[in-house]
Image (cartoon, rainbow, N blue to C red):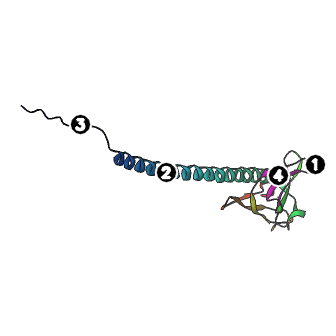
């Protein structure tokens, strides 16, 4: 009776382990690159969303005040600003400053100024004063905002209700 001893090969060899580690490292590197690209894209989208949302809020505020107030007819030729006499009697001016790319709201009665919208690359106020009295009857507003390499343009128009007769 002969007894044979057999050698057990129950484990992995070193080349097999190195191959598994290499494949795992490559998969983790690919997942990391994809995850980093996803985070970068999310941040850019969030920035442009905030910028466009501020511009929309500014347009809504401007058009609301145009509808309920009077546009200064002496300001008819200016494309970068719009002066309004509000329903409460105060006088305000919306002005785009191309030097610092901001839209400002100036309260002409109190002298208080503040930034209404940042990252504005272009803005125009087109006023229509084709009335017998020379009053401005509507204003078309166009604003372009940028965040990074992305630019978005928004437009709105408002009719001055106090001139409708």
Residue furthest left in the image:
1
Quarter where residue 139 is shown: bottom right
Q: Earlier in the sequence, mark 4 or mark 2?
A: 2
Categorize mark 2 by other alpha carbons within 10 Å: few (<14), some (14-19), many (20+): few
Q: CA distance from mark 2 to mark 1?
A: 57 Å
Near-viewer residue (122 or 93): 122
Judged left or right of residue 22, residue 120 is right
Judged left or right of residue 116, residue 155 is left
Is disc 4 in contact with disc 2, using a CB cutoff of under 8 Å? no
Mark 3: secondary structure: loop
Bounds of the magenta span? 93-117
Residue 109 at x, y percent in the picture: 93, 48
Observer-side mark, 4 or 1, equals 1
Mark 2 highlights which residue? 29
Instruction: Tell me the number on the disc at residue 69.
Output: 4
Mark 1: secondary structure: loop
Q: Earlier in the sequence, mark 4 or mark 1?
A: 4
Q: For residue 124: magenta?
A: no
Q: Main secondary structure of the magenta part?
A: strand
Mark 1 highlights which residue? 111
Residue 20 at x, y percent in the picture: 38, 47
Question: At 55% across and 53% down in the image, what residue appears?
Answer: 37
Q: Earlier in the sequence, mark 3 or mark 1?
A: 3
Q: Earlier in the sequence, mark 2 or mark 1?
A: 2
Observer-side mark, 3 or 1, equals 3
Instruction: Tell me the number on the disc at residue 8.
Output: 3
């Amino acid at each position: 009776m002969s007894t044979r001893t057999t050698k057990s090969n129950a484990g992995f060899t070193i080349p097999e382990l190195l191959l598994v580690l290499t494949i795992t490292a490559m998969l983790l590197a690919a997942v990391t690159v994809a995850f980093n690209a996803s985070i970068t894209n999310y941040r850019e989208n969030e920035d442009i969303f905030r910028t466009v949302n501020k511009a929309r809020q500014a347009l809504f505020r401007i058009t609301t005040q145009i509808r309920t107030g009077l546009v200064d007819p002496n300001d008819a030729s200016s494309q970068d600003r719009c002066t309004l006499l509000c329903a409460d009697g105060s006088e305000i001016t919306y002005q785009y400053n191309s030097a610092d790319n901001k839209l400002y709201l100036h309260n002409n009665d109190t002298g208080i100024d503040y930034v209404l919208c940042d990252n504005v690359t272009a803005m125009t106020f087109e006023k229509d004063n084709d009335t017998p009295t020379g009053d401005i009857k509507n204003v078309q507003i166009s604003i372009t905002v940028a965040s990074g390499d992305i630019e978005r343009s928004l437009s709105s128009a408002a009719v001055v209700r106090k001139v409708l007769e």
